[in-house]
Image (cartoon, rainbow, N blue to C red):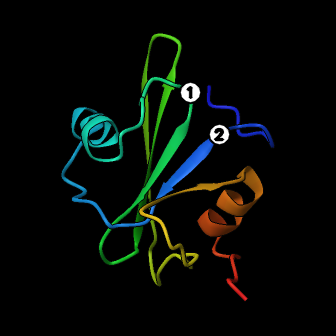
Amino acid sequence: MIHLTSTTPIMFATKSVDFRKGIDGLSGLCEHVLKQNPRSGTLFVFVSRDATKVRILAYEGNGFWLMTKRLSSGKFPLPKFSESLSTIDAQRLRKILSGLFNDN
């Protein structure tokens, strides 16, 4: 079970990724491109090119979770970041996933 708390480390990849990638592809992206350890307990958030899908990769003790949310209509309201990988908090992630995020 994934617990999303105020202390959960969350990294948001700001460049869109190929959503044909599964666990192995995304964990490889974390290691080789983002230079992060995918087994660190951090949640890694990825967005599709058209911003209609979000994937979250998480490692929990003995294996990976890969969660996907696809919108029926519209796009995810994404924050503007200056870095290719940015830290966000759980409250901000919840707002993004629920469609309530406003970058103003």
Residue 82, percent from left and from top: 50, 73
Q: Is residue 54 left or right of residue 90?
A: left
> Tag on residue 41?
1
Q: In the figure, residue 17 lies in which quadrant?
A: bottom left
Q: In the figure, residue 72 lies in which quadrant?
A: bottom left
> Tag count in the figure?
2
Q: Which residue is mark 2?
A: 9
Q: Amino acid at mark 1?
A: Gly
Q: Is residue 15 left or right of residue 100?
A: left
The relative height of residue 46 versus residue 43 in the rendered view (above or below) is: below
Disc 1 is placed on an element classified as loop
Q: Circle 1: is it few (<14), some (14-19), or many (20+) Cα within 10 Å?
A: some
Of labels 1 and 2, earlier in sequence is 2
Q: Amino acid at mark 2?
A: Pro
Disc 2 is placed on an element classified as loop
Q: Residue at the spot x=41%, y=30% of the render?
A: 38
Residue 7, percent from left and from top: 78, 37
The relative height of residue 55 versus residue 5 in the rendered view (above or below) is: below
Q: Circle 2: is it few (<14), some (14-19), or many (20+) Cα within 10 Å?
A: some
Residue nearest the observer in this picture, 26 or 95 = 26
The relative height of residue 86 versus residue 56 in the rendered view (above or below) is: below
Distance, label 1 to label 2, CA atoms, is: 7 Å
User: Cβ–Cβ below 8 Å for labels 1 and 2?
Assistant: yes
Q: Residue at the spot x=48%, y=25% of the render?
A: 59
Residue 34, percent from left and from top: 35, 46
